[in-house]
Structure formats: structure tokens, C-alpha cells
Image (cartoon, helix red, strand yellow):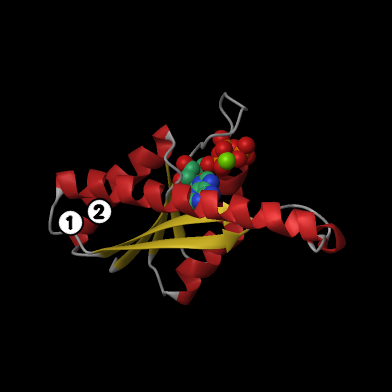
Amino acid sequence: MIRHIVVAVDASPSSDNAVEMAVDLARSYGAKLSFLNVIRDMQLPESVLRMAEVEHIQGARSDVLRFVGEKTLKQAERKAREIDPKMEIEKRVAVGDPASEIADFAKKTKADLIVIGTRGHGELKGMFLGSVSRKVSNLAQVNVMIVR
Ligand SMILES: Nc1ncnc2c1ncn2[C@@H]1O[C@H](COP(=O)(O)OP(=O)(O)OP(=O)(O)O)[C@@H](O)[C@H]1O
Ligand SMILES: [Mg+2]
């Protein structure tokens, strides 16, 4: 039985396809949807992050990224509601390593399925999976559907 589906949303074309697929599944199973966007942690040493100037910029950066994350989620919700206005949808912004956050969130919320795109906004084109979808399929303890 599929009751709760987590969708990893980053506003890329395959993430949009993942949203459509997840809405379809949620409708057939009567499942609830959670849309999750993860703000990537700044990859700098702690000591550098604590410098006053960096703290200031980091704050501004995370405000912008949170704004973009929320906007991304709203767009996904709008897309979902075009298909079915009555869908039960929760939207969530998390901070950290995207794949770990997605896998952790699915575990914590006892999701039955993660739906994720093959590719995101990364530069690398071609036949390969993006690093987030690859890492989620390695890490997650629930089933993962990777949508093209
Ligand atoms: N920050 C994020 N928050 C939520 N979901 C994400 C995030 N980044 C990626 N995803 C999900 O993972 C899917 C694959 O994206 P991924 O980032 O793995 O590919 P990429 O950007 O092409 O490659 P890479 O990031 O390795 O350069 C996306 O379609 C989306 O569903
Ligand atoms: Mg990416």
C-alpha cells in the first residue's frame, strides 16, 4: 500500500516529470504527497563560516535560497493542483546535503515511496544519473522511483 509519497523537487525538467508521476500515483492510491526542496549547505570550513563577514553573506545567501526553495515548492504545488485541485500536499524546505535530507525525511515521515528526477540543474548532460538521484537510491530505506 502506498500512503505517503515524498517528491524531491528542484524545478528542473525531470523534477517536473517526477511531480506529474507522483500526482498520478497519489491519485490512484489515495496517498498524501510531501514536496521537499533542500538548500545545500555552504561547503566551507567551520572556522571560515564563523568569520563575521562570511556570516553576514551566508545569512543573505540562505534568505535567497529559502525564497527560491519556497517558490520552487509553490510552483510544484500549482502544477499538481492543475491535475487535481483536491490533492493533499505538504511543502517542506530543508537545509543540508540534498540526498541525505531526502532519505532522512522519507524515513522520519514513514514514507512508502520517494519520487525523484533523473537529472537536475547540473552541467553534466548525457545518459548518467545526477549525483542526488544516485545517492538517494543508494541511501534510502524506502523504494525510490527515478523519473526521466
Ligand atoms: N536541492 C534539491 N532538493 C530537492 N530535490 C533535489 C535537489 N537537487 C536535486 N533534486 C532531485 O534530484 C533529481 C536529480 O538531480 P541531480 O541533482 O541528481 O542531477 P544534476 O543536477 O543533473 O547532477 P549534479 O547535481 O550531480 O550535478 C532532480 O530531478 C530532483 O528530483
Ligand atoms: Mg543537482
Q: Which mark is residue 28?
A: 1
Q: Nearer the viewer, residue 95 or 101?
A: 95
Question: Identity of the amino acid at label 1?
Answer: Ser
- Disc 2: which residue: 25
Question: Identity of the amino acid at label 2?
Answer: Leu
Q: Could you say which quadrant of the image residue 136 lies in?
A: bottom right
Position of 126 relative to 106 (above/below) = above
Say which residue appears at 48% left-offset and 76% top-offset.
108
Q: Which mark is residue 57?
A: none
Label 2 and label 1: CA atoms lie apart by: 5 Å
Under tag 1, what secondary structure? helix
**For this view, does 43 lie left or right of residue 107?**
right
Say which residue appears at 57% left-offset and 23% top-offset.
126
Q: Residue furthest top?
A: 126
Q: Position of residue 57 (x, y in %)?
A: 69, 51
Q: Position of residue 135 (x, y in %)?
A: 61, 52
Residue 45, visible in the rendered structure: yes
Q: Position of residue 121 (x, y in %)?
A: 53, 34
Q: Nearer the viewer, residue 137 or 74?
A: 74
Q: Nearer the viewer, residue 46 or 115?
A: 46
Residue 138, visible in the rendered structure: no
Task: Report how many numbered discs are placed on residues in the image.
Answer: 2
**For this view, does 45 lie left or right of residue 40?**
right
Asked if the residue under mark 1 is in contact with the one under mark 2, i.e. CB atoms within 8 Å, the reply is yes
Under tag 2, what secondary structure? helix
**For this view, does 18 lie left or right of residue 99?**
left
